[in-house]
Image (cartoon, rainbow, N blue to C red):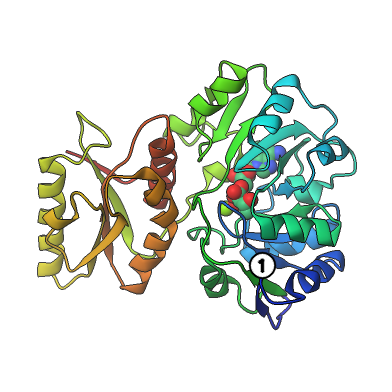
Amino acid sequence: MLKKYDTIYKSTSETGAISEAAEILKEGGLVAFPTETVYGLGADALNSDAASKIYAAKGRPSDNPLIVHIADKNDVYKLASEVPECAKILMEAFWPGPLTLIFKKKEIVPDGTTGGLSTVAVRMPSHPDAMALIKKSGVFIAAPSANTSGRPSPTAAEHVLEDMNGRIDMILDGGAVGIGIESTIVDTTSSVPTILRPGFITRSMLESQVGQVEFDKALFIQDPSVKPKAPGMKYTHYAPSGELSIVESETTPGKVTDSVIDTINNLVLSHEAKGEKVAVLATGDTSPLYKCKNIILLSDTDDDITVAQRLYGALRECDRVGADYIYSESFSGDELGGAIMNRLIKAAGHRIIKV
Ligand code: TXA
Ligand code: MG
């Protein structure tokens, strides 16, 4: 049985809130806190019992390892048995920030934190509240996104409350996050650095520092027998309750063509005729062209940074309006658009309507 908690909810600006959270972490408890990407659900990374509570609170499969958050670059050497040259360059260029690096792990990192893997994922977040919490607690913080497993990652403290109230000790509210999708994950143990999860730090940004960088091939292959190197990438994720489909132009993926708009409008019409509720996820430029009661704006203009910030909140909004069916425009490319599309495809359980 999962322990029932009285979850404490405090703003990070409240005097003593971060110290209180730090005490809870030291004692092996669970605290949700803001980072620049999404809210994390933290526990002492070197305390196996504490880390195991994260899995229970999230309903997370135990083979899905956690990211260890640090507040000082040098602490990487306490967790990693080898720090390759490319990792040193990437740490200098992008830490603190939305980049997670995979290393061979040292003995002190428990299997409970790494899902039994011999590697460990490490990230130094740039959010001042996250930094303050790590420093104040004096522990390394293992933290997945603070959502129930399978639901959209939380980009505001209210999202954490929706999913985690009564399941964790404390929620620190630091306002809405800046980036909105999870960190880029790069495996530095392979001969060529490999992106296991795309994010705000894009391939070209990485390549400008260390030369050639590859994507994990499993990211683009539909075959379920090809296993992604980041165990979490194999699960359906971020899914709203309604059935989400992406409508994509066959010839110009990522571009919203007339036939994308016509297809979405026809689908909306046929669902609404049956009394079903529909929502459309649209960007500002094309949103006036949809004939649907629930148009959820991913951006005011055609701007991927805003789409990333709003995406998970928009998926939760689909639940709030009670949408049975959801249609989204598509995104593409090697840069942020590709990272957005990666999350959308998982939220849609790979349902893509090509037109
Ligand atoms: O932005 C982020 O990274 C957020 C914030 C809270 O820092 N955290 C986050 O954690 O997204 P989570 O648990 O939702 O996703 C972690 C991903 C999973 O896909 C997991 O499988 C992968 O990282 N991962 C963790 N350790 C790994 C390892 N040793 N090797 C390969 N993949 C690993
Ligand atoms: Mg997650």
Q: Is residue 189 visible?
A: no
Amino acid on which disc 1 is placed:
Ala
Q: In this rendering, would 62 be left or right of 232?
A: right
Residue occupying image coordinates x 84% and y 66%: 28
Residue in front for this viewpoint, 140 or 270: 140
Q: Is residue 120 visible?
A: yes
Q: Which residue is mark 1?
A: 57
Question: Of all residues shown, which one is farthest toward the bottom?
Answer: 6
Q: Is the CB–ligand 1 distance for label 1 below 8 Å? A: no
Quadrant in the picture for the C terminus = top left
Residue occupying image coordinates x 82% and y 61%: 136
Category of crowding for the residue at label 1, using alpha-carbon neighbours closer than 10 angstroms: few (below 14), some (14–19), many (at least 20): many
Residue 116: x and y in percent read: 77, 43
| 190 w.r.t. 124: above or below | above
Residue 217: x and y in percent read: 50, 26
Residue 351: x and y in percent read: 32, 46
Residue occupying image coordinates x 16% and y 44%: 260
| 201 w.r.t. 189: above or below | below
| 276 w.r.t. 111: above or below | below
